[in-house]
Image: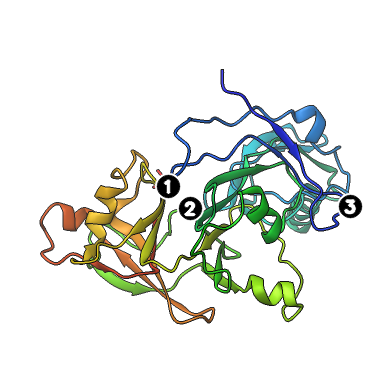
Amino acid sequence: MKKFIVISLVLFSCSQPPSFYGLPNNNENNNNNSSEPPIDIEQISPLIGNPDVKPTLMRGDSVRITVLNESELSRQVTIDPRGTFDYPWLGIIKATGITPWELQERVKTLLAQDYIVDPQVFVEVMNYAPRKVFVLGGVNKTGEYFLNPGEKITLLQLITLSGGFQSGAKKDSIMIVREGEESGLGKSPDEGSKDDPPVKETKSDKEIIYVSLDKIEKGEMQKDPVLLPGDIIIVPRTSKVCYVWGAVNSTGPMPLPPDEKLTLLKAIVLSGGFNKFAAGHKVQVLRPEGTSNSYKTYTVNVDAIASGKVKDDFEIKSGDIIYVPESLF
């Protein structure tokens, strides 16, 4: 039986600090496997129709929608990897990034437009998907950290929880990789097919936010940023490394060999290979440009490279973020 510790930390003078369940799933520094503890729905599920419930919905959450006197419309749905669900009469409805109350009002408004006069709609959360933030690079305990729905953690709190910085960590250029409004790291991009060119520069639905801890401590930067579920925190090191994340068997920083180039296929192999959910034909490489928030995104068909259909592999550079998405189906 795997054990989990509930940790309550009062950090940086927060009156209501985030509480965590579970220990980090540490691929780099911890050989113990961990699993997610069950979520007590009776404690965290919002009351039906309560506008004060703060947790926003995300992919994997299950909600029950009840429409009075309309049994055909009353059902439980799960938000899919695109952040949507299919609903009778209305079709595809966007649900991520809003509260259950806001979803209730959205469904009510849509039904009232063309179908039902003054519909009585109620939305109840039946199950919350795990809320996670991730930290890689120059900290002592890399891995994933679980949050209860609605609870918040700041960057400095996560750094403290992860055991602080390692020697050689670059505290002046911490990266927060964050999903965009419509999609993100938890989903497989819609664009792209197995017949696409092996390498192409693409638009990204991800944002890289650079944070200088030194400037925060000196008061030269805005307050300690609050992290969002799904955020990946990368603490760079002075050594040359890239970062592998997503549907591979071993995630985390990967040193670049000093005397030979590292290719994308080799990096995937060194990370234990794809897992069974990987979309290997559309692996993303995010390449930061300088210390600004700009970066290039390349989508690479690693399956074609591995099968020998493409001769030239994609070269990885120091600081690259390799993300292997999961297939939607």
Residue that carries the numbered disc 3 in the rendered image: 15
Residue that carries the numbered disc 1 in the rendered image: 328
Observer-nearest of 258 and 192 = 258
Residue 116, image x, y percentages: 79, 49
Residue 135, above or below 319: above
Label whose residue precedes the other's in the sequence (3 or 1): 3
Residue 44, image x, y percentages: 79, 35
Secondary structure under badge 3?
loop
Label whose residue precedes the other's in the sequence (3 or 2): 3
Q: Residues within 10 Å of mark 2 (few under 14, many from 20)?
A: some
Residue in view at x 66 percent, y 48 percent: 161
Q: Which part of the image, by quadrant, shows the N terminus? A: top right
Residue 129, above or below 227: above
Q: Which part of the image, by quadrant, shows the C terminus? A: top left
Residue that carries the numbered disc 2 in the rendered image: 187
- The mark closer to the camera, 2 or 1, is 2
Farthest residue to the top: give it: 1
* Quadrant assignment, res 67: top right
Q: Is residue 327 left or right of residue 111?
A: left
Q: Residues within 10 Å of mark 1 (few under 14, many from 20)?
A: some
- The mark closer to the camera, 3 or 1, is 3
Amino acid type at image mark 1: Leu
Residue in view at x 89 percent, y 52 percent: 15
Q: Is residue 110 left or right of residue 185?
A: right
- Mark 2–mark 1 Cα distance, whole angstroms, equals 7 Å
